[in-house]
Amino acid sequence: MTTSTDVFTLTAAFHEAFGTVPDGVWQAPGRVNLIGEHTDYNEGFVLPFAIDKTAKVAVRVRDDSTVRLLSTFGGHGLVEASLDGLEPGSGEGWSRYPLGVAWALKERGVSVPGFELLLDSDVPLGAGLSSSHAIECAVITALNELTGANLPAEELVLATQRAENIFVGAPTGIMDQSASLRGAKGQAVFLDCRDQHVELVPFDAEASGLVLLVIDTKVSHSHADGGYASRRASCELGAQVLGVTALRDVGVEDLEAASGLLDEVTMRRVRHVVTENDRVLQTVELLGAQGPASIGPLLDASHASMRDDFEISCPELDLAVDTARASGAIGARMTGGGFGGSAIALTPVGEEHKVRDAVVRSFAEAGYTAPDIFTVTPAEGAFRLA
């Protein structure tokens, strides 16, 4: 797992790379989604939180339209591009994210100058913790300030979504960037994806004698591939057949009638989204009334729905969830877009080492790559560091 670089070291590395000092350093966090998967693009409800793993960018404005991008990751050389004529599909690898953000801001009428940027991130790649959105949110926070655009968070969310959807080509919703831009320490972000209304919900696992473990299965995933897009298409088909704007408008009580109108696969996809929305609302209510120790069964039910109805789990995720639950976790589920990535396990402090050891052992016995296991806590959203 990568380790975050401090501001002084990043600034020194920027000076070494570009021969000058940056105008500032900004950071944005990755996120864990506590519950509410594949509901965001269905105009539903999600409950993520920003985590204490971040992408940092040191940035300096240029007086021309050239963009020069460099990362502290080994094996990635300097990327140069021009903002003139920048089009969707430009760039390769991680460079698509800052370039996409610059393109999306220009589309909104912001005068974006050329810039030099050095990226450092300790958000695990491909783990379902939104490493790409952490980069985008750090960059857009920097450019929003450096250009004097001063766009509100809601606009930055939509700009990063457009960068992701059109420039990068990944049909994602608004959950990840909302958590990264609008998160707060000790709080989960209860987001209504229809109107971007946010309520911060206290989530202090430690005070309840719990830890939230992230189990990175090391099975890499990508939102730009077909699995994610096909699930989204199924949801749009379901909404169309049911005559609603989005699946947000279908209630649990409507599912029985819907089953007579939809083919079997589409029905299962719809059922996941509808019941997942309901689970988010129940989780928010329980956190307010009883605290984190009460939500375990909802996490379990969410994973079963993603495994069986939405079919976005994989053997490694299922093994992580099942083993964690059998070893003392009070609730566990895969988190993120699926097809790999990470699981989360809400675990009593006294059972943490038992759960960790059991998961590592089960992966070894199954012949899987050893997972990374670490704890996360709700952290601040994007801001300027220096």
Image (tube, rainbow, N blue to C red):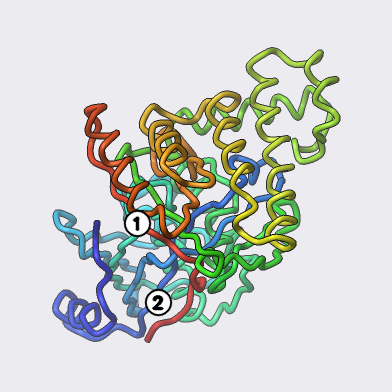
For the residues labelled 1 and 2, the Cα–Cα distance comes to 24 Å
Q: Residue at x 36, y 32 (%)?
A: 316
The three-letter amino acid code for the residue at tag 2 is Trp
Q: Around disc 1, counting alpha carbons within 10 Å, would you say few (fewer than 14), some (14 to 19), or many (20 or more)?
A: some
**Is residue 106 among what the camera can see?**
no
Which one is closest to the eye, mark 1 or mark 2? 1
Q: Whole-percent x and y of residue 201? A: 66, 65
**Is residue 15 among what the camera can see?**
yes
Q: Are marks 1 and 2 in contact (CB under 8 Å)?
A: no
Q: Whole-percent x and y of residue 22? A: 29, 83
Q: Is residue 86 left or right of residue 9?
A: right
Badge 1 element: strand
First reached walking from the N terminus: tag 1 or tag 2: 2
Residue beneath disc 2 = 26
Res. 350 image quadrant: bottom left
Q: Is residue 353 above or below residue 105?
A: above
Q: Residue at x 65, y 42 (%)?
A: 39
Q: Nearer the viewer, residue 310 or 97?
A: 310
Res. 184 image quadrant: bottom right
The quarter in which the N terminus is drawn is bottom left
The quarter in which the C terminus is drawn is bottom left
Badge 2 element: strand
Q: Which mark is residue 374?
A: 1
Q: Residue at x 34, y 72 (%)?
A: 57
Q: Whole-percent x and y of residue 15? A: 18, 82
The three-letter amino acid code for the residue at tag 1 is Phe
Q: Is residue 290 left or right of residue 350?
A: right
Q: Around disc 2, counting alpha carbons within 10 Å, would you say few (fewer than 14), some (14 to 19), or many (20 or more)?
A: many
